[in-house]
Image (spheres, grey):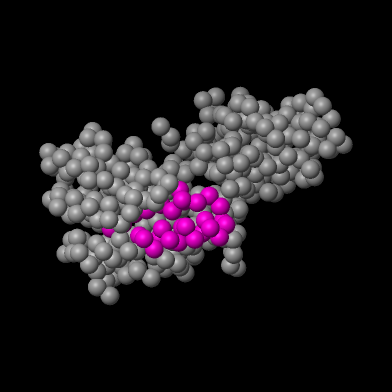
Amino acid sequence: MPDVKAMPLGGPPAIDTLAADRPSLSEFPTPLVTLSEDALAHNLRTMAAWCASAGVGLAPHGKTTMSRVLWQRQLDAGAWGITVATPWQASVALDWGVPRILLANELVQPAAIRALAPHAGRLTVWADSVRAVELLASVLDEVDAPVPLAVLVELGGAGGRTGARGVDAALEVARAIAAAPTLRLAGVGGYEGALAHDASTSSLDRVRSYLAEMVRLHEELDAQDLYPAEGPVLLTAGGSAYFDDVAAVLAPLRDPEGERGRPVDVVLRSGAYITHDDGFYRGITPFSRGGSGERLRSAIHGWATVLSRPEPGLVLVDAGKRDLPYDEGLPEVQAVRPLRGGPAVPVEGAEVTAMNDQHTFIRVPADALVEVGDVVRLGLSHPCTAFDKWRALPLVDDALSDDPRVVGLIETLFG
């Protein structure tokens, strides 16, 4: 299969027998990115248990993996639905049979509105301006949607991404949604991750202040009778960095059965948890910032062969920007598997310093036992920009074992 760069050259194994044959990872070419079944299963269990304990639902962001198999595993683990970012991703989710789809973005393209309108019963979208509402309503007035389209008013924050700036502006958007017969005001959406980028006190304070504004908006919508007389209300926020704060602020409002009045559901949209990483999310995830119990494990790794040691302290390997993520930190050197055989061993002082399209520069001590032909295991940062470089990723039993075995292939779909 020369059209799939993850597969062995020449005579690739039969994909449908990988689980039974369990070929050694050493039979696969580098550069390579793998997923670890052991860590994936752990992360699915851990996040499901955390959400249940915190009293929130989960609609993981599907853009992270764009993998039908992984989406289904998330749904099987109890996910409320799947979040997407674009109309095309929504169409993929529809084709894959996802029962509830949250398009966490403004839907304003007339052709996309017309295409998605027949599926309004499975779809929830966002709006952050009266103009966006007008575009939605004008197109839906011309087509035959089975039910009014559920729309969340999106609240933003100064310097953030999309979202109406302030509660007063968001109320104007909500009034426009409520007045449109083809739309249904379904709740409040937001994204706190664009407002902070670390776990400092000031960043966490800003996130919590923003979430409190989401609560105030929801309460105003309820007090002004802008919500429909019947039907549930959805409150959603939460990327992969601050979902603990989202749960702390929003979970007290959750009442899916309507025991306190109007049914209210609270749903996180964290997506990167399924693979976690060895960089940005490792440092900022609530599982690392505090608390006890199970933590997420990195389930995604890069593999690269040493091509050259042109200087005593320099190693060049065959993976680069076309293969590995680099937007939220460079890969980290975890271990080297000697070509001559034996277990993978760490290399003290090894550090990735730069990346080209097809090469990565690694600085090592001059006496480091790293030879041409050895294979380096790399920890990766930010899985969202790793998956989109691969049409398929080998699934290994355990990437950290001395001899990882390939037990499957996870295919992806990116436009």
In front here: 36 or 57?
Answer: 57
Q: Is residue 73 visible?
A: no
Horizontal arrangement in the rendering, residue 300 relative to residue 101 (left or right): right
Please tell me whether residue 166 belongs to the stretch shown in magenta. no
Q: Residue 230: image x %, image y %?
A: 18, 64
Residue farthest along the bottom direction in this orientation: 260
Q: Look at the image and tell me whether residue 160 can be seen.
A: yes
- What kind of secondary structure does the magenta stretch mostly adopt? helix
Total of numbered circles in the picture? 0
Identify the residue at image location x=34%, y=64%.
Answer: 215
**Range covered by the magenta-colored residues:** 187-214
Q: Position of residue 293 (x, y in %)?
A: 59, 67
Q: Residue at x 28, y 41 (%)?
A: 107
Of 96 and 105, which appears nearest the observer?
105
| Nearer the observer, 244 or 373 | 244
Where residue 238 sits in the image (x, y, percent)? 43, 55
Residue sitting at x 53%, y 29%: 4
Left or right, 35 with reference to 344:
left
Q: Quadrant of the C terminus?
A: top left
Q: Is residue 289 left or right of residue 306?
A: left
Q: Is residue 5 above or below residue 250?
A: above
Q: Quadrant of residue 114?
A: top left
